[in-house]
Image (tube, rainbow, N blue to C red):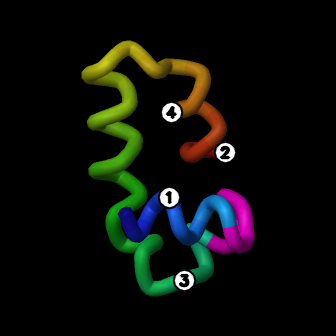
Amino acid sequence: MKLNQTEINGGFTDLDEAPFGVFTPEIIHILNEINAVASANIVSN
């Protein structure tokens, strides 16, 4: 829910700058696990 709110309100750029950025490696891992590779690449960039 927090990822969705952050992405909708400020985009992926704000995700890394917000306190939720600490979850970025976990988010990338989960996106890769569900074969959302393009989204994982966007988050990692």
**Amino acid bearing label 4:** Ala
CA–CA distance between discs 3 and 2? Answer: 16 Å
* Residue position for label 4: 40
- Residue 3: image x %, image y %? 45, 62
Q: Position of residue 17 (x, y in %)?
A: 61, 80
Taking depth in this image into account, of 41 and 3 the one nearest to the observer is 3
Sequence-first disc among 2 and 1: 1
Closer to us: 4 or 31: 4
Q: Residue at x 30, y 36 (%)?
A: 29
Q: Quadrant of residue 20?
A: bottom left
Per the image, label 2 sits on a secondary structure element best described as loop
Nearer the N terminus, badge 2 or badge 4?
4
Camera-near label (3 vs 1) is 1
Residue at horizontal 37 percent and vertical 63 percent from the top: 1
Q: Quadrant of residue 6?
A: bottom right
> Pointer 1: what residue?
4
* Residue receiving disc 2: 45
Q: Earlier in the sequence, mark 3 or mark 2?
A: 3
Q: Which mark is residue 18?
A: 3
The spot of residue 31 in percent (x, y) is 38, 31
Q: In 3D space, how far apart are the residues under numbered discs 2 and 1 (Cα atoms)?
A: 18 Å
How crowded is the residue under tag 4: few (<14 C-alpha within 10 Å), some, or many (20+)?
A: many
Left or right of residue 35, residue 38 in this image? right
Q: Main secondary structure of the magenta part?
A: helix
